[in-house]
Image (spheres, helix red, strand yellow):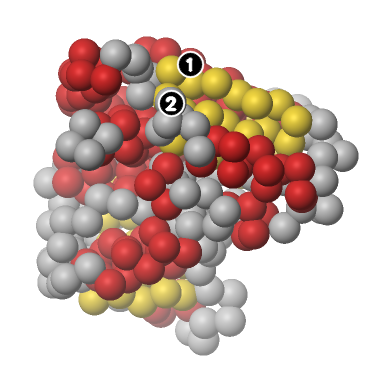
């Protein structure tokens, strides 16, 4: 029988520990862990993401504030705000909500964040740490979506060491850091993408297949080895033939779930894990101050 790797079950197990950790931080330093989000402009999807983060922070005992800047904010002004937050000892985590307006170089802004406050896991220093840890490391620093996937695999007892893992997608947010985390856990990793020759054959060799392309139902049953673990990172919104709004992943869930050994649903799979790992890293950043 196929295991449906729902985030809700894993989050329930994680939630109690996060609440305890946040309470311990508050008892020790006299305030809740703080996450400050910089939101530039009025992108509707970004506004929804930020509200979801705010709601989850409140549930876990994290103080989350959003600094909403106008769409015409200059890069210099945004960098000045980042440096101000870097110097604020009451701010534990800084997150720049992407995308940012075209006049802003997002790489420059992200890399201006103090690495100790990089709870989104995107700075070059965090990336470097992820790729240079010892083999078979349990390194827990990095982008929140891949971290959430590792948590799901661990929760559902999916062995990683020695497995053939294929990641379809080479983004800096998911594909590349996911490869590092799986490699650090002892998997043999292939990063596939739009220019990969014989892509469907490559996918069929995977014991662990991670789809992160943003292409609706790109992965079909013919692309999956029977018994494989399939992780669907895609979030594709569209209007179906009945005029209803739908959200589906990169994987044809109905077909693939019949042959996979384990699979994440969309919605309810990887997405909710991302927000919780963001909170976990914020709490960890605050806790690190206790020993300083």
Residue 36 screen position, x and y as percent = 53, 29
What's the residue at 59%, 44% (across, down)?
83
Residue 9 screen position, x and y as percent = 24, 26
Residue 93 screen position, x and y as percent = 44, 36
Q: Nearer the viewer, residue 96 or 208?
A: 96
The residue labelled by disc 2 is 90
Whether 55 is drawn above or below 167: the answer is: above
Q: Nearer the viewer, residue 185 or 246?
A: 185
Q: Quadrant of residue 244?
A: top right
Q: Is residue 121 left or right of residue 237?
A: left
Report how far apart the C-alphas of labels 1 and 2 lie in the structure.
20 Å
Whether 194 is drawn above or below 220: the answer is: below
Q: Nearer the viewer, residue 94 or 169?
A: 94
Decide if residue 164 is in sight here: no
The label shown at residue 55 is 1
Element type at mark 2: loop
What's the residue at 39%, 59% (across, down)?
126
Element type at mark 1: helix
Q: Nearer the viewer, residue 287 or 86?
A: 86
Q: Quadrant of the N terminus?
A: top left
Q: Residue furthest bottom?
A: 197
Residue count near mark 1 (Cα–Cα under 10 Å), binned few <14, some 14–19, many ≥20: few
- Nearer the observer: mark 1 or 2; the answer is 2
Q: Residue furthest right?
A: 72
Residue count near mark 2 (Cα–Cα under 10 Å), binned few <14, some 14–19, many ≥20: some
What's the residue at 27%, 55% (across, down)?
229
Residue 114 screen position, x and y as percent = 47, 49
């Amino acid at each position: 029988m196929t295991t449906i790797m729902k985030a809700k079950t894993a989050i329930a197990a994680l939630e109690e520990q996060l609440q305890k950790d946040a309470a311990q931080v508050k008892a020790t330093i006299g305030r809740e862990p703080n996450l400050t989000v910089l939101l530039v402009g009025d992108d509707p999807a970004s506004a929804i993401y930020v509200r979801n983060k705010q709601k989850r922070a409140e549930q876990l005992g994290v103080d989350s504030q959003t600094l909403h800047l106008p769409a015409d904010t200059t890069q210099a002004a945004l960098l000045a705000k980042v440096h101000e937050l870097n110097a604020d000892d009451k701010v534990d985590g800084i997150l720049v909500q992407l995308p940012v307006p075209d006049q802003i170089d997002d790489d420059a802004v992200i890399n201006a964040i103090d690495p100790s406050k990089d709870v989104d896991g995107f700075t070059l220093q965090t990336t470097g740490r992820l790729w240079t840890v010892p083999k078979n490391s349990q390194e827990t620093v990095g982008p929140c979506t891949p971290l959430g996937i590792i948590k799901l695999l661990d929760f559902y007892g999916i062995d990683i060491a020695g497995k053939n893992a294929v990641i379809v997608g080479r983004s800096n947010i998911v594909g590349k850091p996911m490869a590092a985390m799986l490699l650090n856990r002892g998997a043999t990793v292939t990063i596939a993408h739009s220019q990969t020759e014989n892509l469907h054959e490559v996918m069929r060799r995977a014991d662990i297949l991670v789809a992160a392309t943003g292409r609706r139902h790109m992965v079909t049953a013919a692309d999956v080895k029977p018994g494989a673990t399939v992780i669907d990172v895609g979030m594709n919104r569209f209007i179906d033939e009945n005029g209803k709004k739908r959200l589906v992943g990169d994987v044809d869930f109905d077909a693939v779930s019949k042959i996979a050994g384990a699979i994440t649903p969309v919605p309810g799979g990887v997405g909710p894990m991302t927000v919780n790992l963001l909170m976990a890293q914020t709490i960890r950043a605050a806790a690190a101050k206790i020993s300083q």
